[in-house]
Image (cartoon, rainbow, N blue to C red):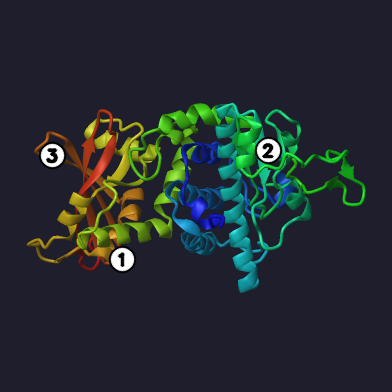
Amino acid sequence: MAEPFEAIFRKSFAEQVTAFRLRLGSLVPSSAWDDLLGNAHDRGFMVAGAVKADLLADLAAAIDKSITEGTGFEAFKRDFRSIVAKRGWTGWTGEDTEVGQGWRMRTIYHTNMRTSYMGGRLAQLRKGNFAFWIYRHGGSNEPRLQHLAWDGLILPSDHPFWQIAFPPNGFGCNCRVFGARSMAGAKRRGGDPAKTLQDGWDQVNPNTSRLDGIGDGWDHAPGGSVSDLVQSMAGKAVNWPYSISRAFMDDLPASAQDAHSTAYRNLVSLQDDVRRYAGAVADGRTVAPIRTMGRLSQAHRQRIAKVSGQDLDNYHFTLDAPAVRHVLAPHGGTSGQFPINQENLALLPRILDRPDSIETEGTSSAGYPFVRFTRRFGAQVYTVSLEIRGNKTRILAVQNMWGKTASAGSRI
């Protein structure tokens, strides 16, 4: 039995992440799905009907998190609903009914997952120098007849068919391609040497005004125009330092980096992740050694440089298990101070994203300088102490966090 595609999506790989992140440097406002066609998708990100830059950045961050961290469709749906409410996005196709909303969310999620997945696979196949590629149907319950007819088709890897019909070949298409170095190997991957392309396969059908089996706007190989770049950039992430890869963001313009990181820190799914991470640490369960909360923005760098004299270029906010244990441990607080639990710890990404104040705070026993971020939510003021770890790690690591109830009319 074929592996469920939801499970496949949650196993991201370096080429897939690269194929998607190459789109983040160009967030394209659009009114319809066909405003961006063909290989233009390889270097641009769009969601039909999304025209505002902040809305596009939020949606891109939600999808990027799903790809890089494998958080799944349910987490994406929570993020999508929160983003739509926060940005006041209305008039999008499907919003009027629960069924329509579910269809639209799945379409956005599935399309970006499939195109990035297959864009990454294309880069892998080209790098592998396979003599033959094999088209395999995705096993959907309602198959497209032409895709089913191509199931098992074996063609040379340089055949023009792949430039047009490398999947996905339409919305919802789950078809895949495998590589083989011999005809015997192709047969082992499900290939059928008896299958051939019919004459005129690359001609537009006069009845439909498109190629048979290829949806409107899908007559190209996703990621095909950037596969060499995907291969080279994917090599940067052989050893990912933590759950979300850092390497791919370095080549984006600063404005794109900032928009992505800010949107990422404000995703409701990231707050859920921090809450679950803290819960797992509190229960003594095994967790990832380090959890990122995104790259520092240019504003962060400028504010920290002003108080500390250090320019934290390409630094990331991080949280680890020892810090969680320290934060959650009982402390003898001062008047008005309250303990931090898993719920208010989930506010951490938002505190870090937009602090009311940033101050220096001496050095740690290891000789690393500290900075202190403070942010107020209503009557509650939260303070986070972070250690600046330079050299190769380049992280701003959370060390402690505490909260205090502010008196009426008081200022930070």
Q: Is residue 252 above or below residue 272?
A: above
Q: Is residue 87 above or below residue 304?
A: below
Counting from the top left corner in percent of width and height, residue 305 is at 28, 33
The amino acid marked with disc number 1 is Gly
Q: Tell me the crowding category of disc 1: few under 14, some 14 to 19, or many 20 or more residues within 10 angstroms, Cα based.
A: few
Say which quadrant the C terminus sits in: bottom left
For discs 2 and 3, the disc positioned in front in the rendered view: 2
- The mark found on residue 158 in the picture is none
x, y percent for residue 45: 60, 44
Q: CA distance from mark 2 to mark 3?
A: 54 Å
| Residue 174 shows in the view | yes
Q: Residue at x 26, y 46 (%)?
A: 289
Secondary structure state at the residue bearing disc 2: loop
Q: Check whether the beta carbons of the residues at disc 2 and disc 3 lie within 8 A of each other.
A: no
Q: How busy is the neighbourhood of tag 3: few (under 14 within 10 Å), some, or many (20 plus)?
A: few
Q: Secondary structure at mark 1?
A: loop
Q: State yes or no: discs 2 and 1 in contact (Cβ < 8 Å).
A: no
Mark 2 crowdedness (10 Å alpha carbons): few <14, some 14-19, many ≥20: many
The residue wearing badge 3 is: 362
Residue appearing at x 77%, y 47% in the figure: 214
Q: Which residue type carries mark 3?
A: Gly
Tag 2: residue type?
A: Ala
The answer to whether any part of residue 37 appears in the image is: no
Residue 193 image-quadrant placement: top right
Q: What is the distance, in whole Å, between disc 2 and disc 1 at their CAs?
A: 51 Å
The residue indicated by pointer 1 is: 378
Q: In this view of the protein, which residue sits in the foreground, 383 or 398?
A: 398
> In this image, 131 relative to 147: left or right?
left
In the picture of the structure, the residue carrying the numbered disc 2 is 221
Q: Residue furthest right?
A: 206
Give the Cα distance between marks 3 and 1. Answer: 29 Å
